[in-house]
Amino acid sequence: MRQRGFTLVEMVVVVAIIGTLLSIGVLQFNAMQKKSAIEQQVRKIYNKLMEARVEALYTKTPRTAVLDGSKLSITDGSGTPISELPLSYPMVMGGGFDRVTFNAGGVMPMSDVDRAICVEPGGVAENNGNIDSVVISAVKIHMGKRKSGEACVPNKIDQK
């Protein structure tokens, strides 16, 4: 009489293959989650800066965005905080700056140089996000990707 079923060796091999594939999938999933979180944070900063610019224009009151690494604060002309955005990943503003001011017309003064805000997860410039930076010029705000290993300055960011 012939018996049907699997041997113990066959079952162990199948379980080992499934375990290997599962561990690869979990590692890739974690990397994708981090990438998504970085991109989401950059989009939130972009939106908060656009909101500050529009508020400055409509209320005819200057707005200042102050970055301290762990949060982005928006203040009015008198310095009163209007809103805060806590940041999951540390951010830096290139060029030794820590703030961006939009005048009552919603424009960054022409005397100011363009600014860049970049994500630096783990304190390093490298990350796998497709969008990891915000570039602020006198009349425009763009998102972009910093060139590998470069400083957080507008001319080193591929704007999208």
Image (spheres, rainbow, N blue to C red):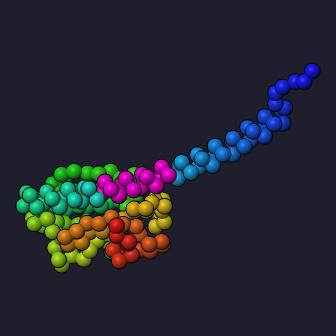
Look at the picture and state if 42 lies above or below 140. above
> What residue do we see at 32% from left, 60% from top?
68
Number of numbered discs visible in the structure rendering: 0
Percent of width and height locating residue 106: 14, 65
Residue 11 found in image quarter: top right
Residue 159 found in image quarter: bottom left
Query: Residue 92: in sight, yes or no?
Result: no
Q: The N terminus lies in which quarter of the figure? A: top right
Q: Nearer the viewer, residue 74 or 155?
A: 155
Left or right for 57, reference 99? left
> What residue do we see at 35% from left, 58% from top?
42
Furthest residue to the right? 1
Furthest residue to the left? 60
> What residue do we see at 87% from left, 24% from top?
3
For the magenta stretch, what is the residue range? Answer: 32-45
Furthest residue to the front? 1
Prevailing SS of the magenta stretch: helix
Percent of width and height locating residue 32: 50, 52
Q: Nearer the viewer, residue 114 or 68?
A: 114
Residue 44 lies in the magenta stretch: yes
Percent of width and height locating residue 6: 82, 30
> What residue do we see at 12% from left, 60% from top?
56
Look at the picture and state if 28 lies above or below 145. above
Residue 36 lies in the magenta stretch: yes
Look at the picture and state if 134 lies above or below 5. below
Q: The C terminus lies in which quarter of the figure? A: bottom left
Query: Residue 127: in sight, yes or no?
Result: yes
Left or right for 45, reference 129? left
